[in-house]
Amino acid sequence: MPSTEQNYQAVQQRLQQACRNHQRDPASVRLLAVSKTKPAAQVEAVYRLGQRAFGENYVQDGLEKITALAHLSDIEWHFIGPLQSNKSRLVAGHFHWVETVDRDKIARRLSEQRPDTMPDLNILVQVNISREAQKAGVLPEQALDFARTVAALPRLQLRGLMCIAEAEADQAVLAAQFAQMRTLFEQLQQEFPLVDTLSMGMSADLELAIACGSTEIRIGTDIFGARDYPDAPH
Ligand SMILES: *Cc1c(COP(=O)(O)O)cnc(C)c1O
C-alpha cells in the first residue's frame, strides 16, 4: 500500500501537471487536503510535508483535531460540511474558512458568533450548480444576491464560491456547469475585489476544474486513504 507521503506527492504531481496542461500557475491553485474521519497524527504528518490547508466535514471530528494541533500556528482549517445552526458557534469560534454557506440564517449566526479577537471568518457561498433537488447550495441565479448579503455582514470576509460536481454527469455537462461557476465567480470579483477563491474540483474532475479556472481543489481519499468510518448521510 502506498504511504501517505507517496499519495500526497502523487496528488501534487497531478495538480502541477494539470496546471501545466492549462497554462495555469500552480501557485494559483490551492490544494485542500480533506482530512475528515482521519486522526490528528495523520494530519500532522501531511502538514510536515508542507501542506497547510485542511478540510473537515464534521464539527466534533474537526474540533478534536484543531485542538490537538493547536501548536501548528499556520495551519488553516476549512469547514466544508453541511452546517446546522446549533453547531455554528463552534465553527465560528475555531475554523478559518466556511465553504458551505447557503442560508441567510447560518451566515447571520456565523457573523454574530465570530469572536472579536479572531480575524474575519472567510466565507465561500455554496452553489448548487447541478440543480439537484437533494443537494445543498443556492441556485446559480441566487448566488450573487446571496453573496452580497454575506459581504455586508460584519466579521465575515466573502472570498468566493464553492460547488460539488454532479456525481454521474458526463464531461460535457460537467464542463458546462464549471463554466457557469466561473462566470459567476468573475461577476462576483467585479463587485468584490477581495474575492479570490473558486473551490471546484475533486479527485475525479481535477483536470477539468483546473481547465475551467478553479483556484481550489479538494482531495481526501487520494491523500489519506479510504475513510475510517462511513460518511454520515447529508
Ligand atoms: C469528502 C469531501 C471531499 C473529498 O472527497 P474524496 O473523494 O475523499 O477526495 C471534497 N469535498 C467535499 C465537500 C467533501 O465532503
Image (tube, grey):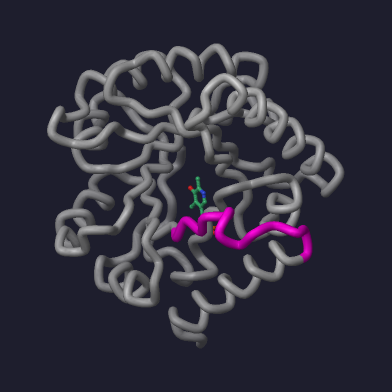
Q: Is residue 132 magenta?
A: no
Left or right of residue 184, residue 147 in this image: left
Give the residue furthest to the bottom.
Answer: 1
Left or right of residue 143, residue 47 in this image: left
Residue occupying image coordinates x 39% and y 56%: 53
Residue 156 pos. (x, y %): 33, 26
Residue occupying image coordinates x 59% and y 37%: 163
Residue 194 pos. (x, y %): 48, 32
Q: Nearer the viewer, residue 168 or 122?
A: 122
Task: Give the magenta part as a residue range.
Answer: 21-33
Quarter of the image where one finds residue 75: bottom left
Quarter of the image where one finds residue 18: bottom right
Residue occupying image coordinates x 51% and y 32%: 195
Q: Nearer the viewer, residue 102 or 32?
A: 32
Q: Is residue 28 magenta?
A: yes
Residue occupying image coordinates x 37% and y 72%: 46
Residue 59 pos. (x, y %): 28, 43
* On screen, residue 174 above or below 123: below
